[in-house]
């Protein structure tokens, strides 16, 4: 049953394909397509504007530095930690008391941290340069 339906359908498709005329693109088809592509490329370029402006960053840095200087100059060394004094951190100290880190591991962690801190700005600069070119 399915074979008969498929056979009839195949014959019908062959008949339609034979009767349909062949189509060819117009004479200036390539020029028309290329002109539409150039119109798409002429769109406005999005200008990068950071969420936090440089002026705000300068203000934040000045505020942080002024608080740090105030704490260093006028801070009271005898202040208590408040409710932090009542907390018991003994279980954390006990769980890490037998942990010994070798010098090689410590050097590796330090080197990894320094490289990470150096690579983030370098990669950001690299990708900003390449994304701006595109």
Image: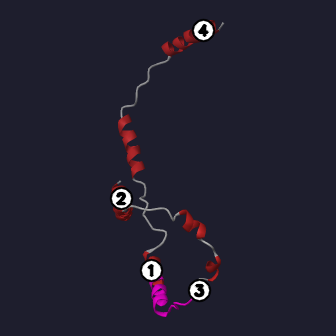
Against 4, residue 97 (above or below) is below
Residue marked by disc 4 = 8
Residue marked by disc 3 = 80
Q: CA distance from mark 4 to mark 1?
A: 80 Å
Q: CA distance from mark 4 to mark 3?
A: 93 Å
Q: CA distance from mark 2 to mark 4?
A: 59 Å
Secondary structure of the residue carrying tag 4 is helix
Residue at coordinates 60% horizontally, 66% vertically from top-left?
91
Observer-side mark, 4 or 3, equals 3
Q: CA distance from mark 2 to mark 3?
A: 52 Å
First-in-chain label (2 vs 3): 3
Q: Which of 60 and 128 lies nearest the eye of the viewer?
A: 60
Residue at coordinates 47% horizontally, 19% vertically from top-left?
21
| Residue 66 picture location, percent across and down | 46, 87
Q: Determine crowd level at label 1: few under 14, some 14-19, many 20+ residues with C-alpha closer than 10 A.
A: few
Residue at coordinates 37% horizontally, 42% vertically from top-left?
34
Q: Is residue 76 magenta?
A: yes
- In the image, the segment drawn in magenta is 64-79
For residue 132, the mark is 2
Observer-side mark, 4 or 1, equals 1
Against 56, residue 69 (above or below) is below
């Amino acid at each position: 049953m399915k074979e008969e339906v498929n056979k009839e359908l195949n014959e019908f498709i062959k008949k339609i394909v034979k009767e349909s005329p062949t189509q060819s693109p117009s004479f200036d088809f390539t020029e028309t397509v290329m002109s539409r592509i150039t119109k798409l490329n002429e769109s406005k370029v999005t200008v990068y504007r950071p969420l936090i402006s440089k002026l705000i960053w300068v203000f934040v840095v000045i505020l942080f530095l002024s608080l740090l200087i105030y704490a260093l100059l006028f801070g009271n060394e005898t202040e208590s930690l408040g409710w932090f004094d009542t907390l018991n951190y003994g279980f954390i100290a006990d769980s890490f008391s037998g942990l010994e880190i070798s010098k090689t591991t410590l050097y590796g962690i330090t080197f990894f941290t320094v490289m990470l801190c150096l690579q983030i700005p370098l990669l950001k600069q690299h990708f900003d340069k390449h994304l701006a070119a595109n």
